[in-house]
Image (cartoon, rainbow, N blue to C red):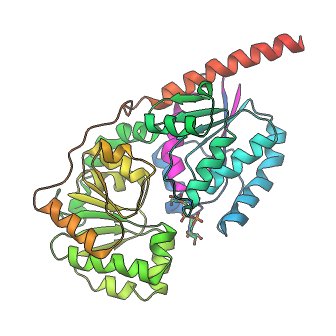
Amino acid sequence: MRIVNIVGARPNLMKIAPIIAEIRRFPDIEPVLVHTGQHYDENMSDVFFRELNIPDPDYNLGVGSGTHTWQTAQVMLALEPLLIKLQPDCVLVVGDVNSTLAAALVAAKLCIPFGHVEAGLRSFDRSMPEEINRQLTDAVSDYLFTTSRDANENLRREGIPEHKIFFVGNVMIDTLHRFRSRAEALQLPSRYGLMPGHYAVLTLHRPSNVDSAGGLGEIVDALEVIQTRLPILFPAHPRTFERLKQFGLLRHLGAMSGIGLLEPLCYLEFLGLMAQSRLVLTDSGGIQEETTVLGVPCLTLRENTERPVTVSQGTNEIVGTSSKWIVEAVWRILDGGGKRGRIPELWDGRAAERIVAILRDILSKRLCTTDRSSG
Ligand code: UD1
């Protein structure tokens, strides 16, 4: 049974790690790992392989950065001959990045059974590149593994037949459970001269937030006010760092004594910082889920979320991107508010186990049928 796992960008890595670890427990499965090279910097990719014990990729397509169309097309062009050579029994992808969609299209065109982990999430906002990736990937997937019941509903509404949908839980949370105590033992806040519970963590990388001077300036205005009461650690994505420079905001931010602008952090350091923070400000998807499990209030600087369970059950609040709303939301938390939340169903550290059990069951039955028909 040969399963080709395809990753491309940073958030794919914490999701694939538990799946590969689980697959490796079964000698009847041969895992092959392909990295598209969408992310390529040491601190955006390699460090996660080492920390999360992901084996080195068997193939790296070395695609790199470009426009969305260019990047998606390059992954497709490089992947097609590789999948033809490998003849896998199944291709498995995680998440919603351009590499995910590219892999889905190639596998579908080659009629290779295809599984999507984290299927069915919808922000209903097509201006978000990931929303298009999610909808199209799910449309051509054979096995759709979901993290929440609302995702099952979304898939049903889009006409995906019931037998293709599997509610299995959240693989990103498998990784969090596995590494949380190691991350907290690093005592990260003291490295930055901070006390646990007395600082915020910020991440920003959505094009809609960082690609215009007005939008990014609005968020920086909010930070200027917030950092007078609560220090903020800000590990900046390379894209965001470039935009801060380009829009002349870097020096402004550098002059604020309560802002710690950092390089992108490795998984353990970032998890350790988040776990002990007072609150998190973010436009990421995965961080909304991680803060829910950590019980840390999360303010999402977007107008919507594809992960509504983090709002209805978890610690997440969608605050938008206006400076006034962001500051008011932070003050509410500092003045005694902040959601407590509870952990969503099946976010129990065993999602990868369920996924691999389902795949082994389906694929072994399929292989038996193929053997019989060819024999
Ligand atoms: C991608 C994903 C996004 C995910 C994010 C996590 C898509 C559409 N977007 O966004 O869903 O949340 O990854 O980080 O797939 N760059 C580097 N070094 C790298 C990688 C990128 O410097 O290793 C810079 C380049 O200037 C590049 C820019 O970051 O142009 C954006 O990278 P890209 O992969 O296109 O998208 P992300 O914004 O990282």
- What is the quadrant of the N terminus in the image? top right
Image: 325 above or below 350: below
Which residue is found at the position 59% from the left and 34% from the top? Answer: 144
Report the image quarter containing ligand 1: bottom right
Q: Which corner quadrant of the image does residue 155 belong to?
A: top right
Q: Which corner quadrant of the image does residue 257 belong to?
A: bottom left
Which residues make up the magenta segment? 1-29
- What is the quadrant of the C terminus in the image? top right
Left or right: where 34 falls relative to 23: right
Q: Position of residue 299 (x, y in %)?
A: 30, 59
| Residue 132 shows in the view | yes
| Residue 28 shows in the view | no
Image: 23 above or below 190: above
Depth check, front residue: 115 or 215: 215
Which residue is found at the position 46% from the left and 50% from the top? Answer: 306
Image: 322 above or below 56: below
Q: Position of residue 131 (x, y in %)?
A: 56, 54
Q: Position of residue 211 (x, y in %)?
A: 50, 76
Residue ranking furthest to the right: 375
Q: Position of residue 235 (x, y in %)?
A: 38, 67
Left or right: where 127 falls relative to 185: right
Within the magenta stretch, is there residue 23? Answer: yes
Depth check, front residue: 284 or 157: 157
Image: 118 above or below 330: above
Within the magenta stretch, is there residue 111? Answer: no
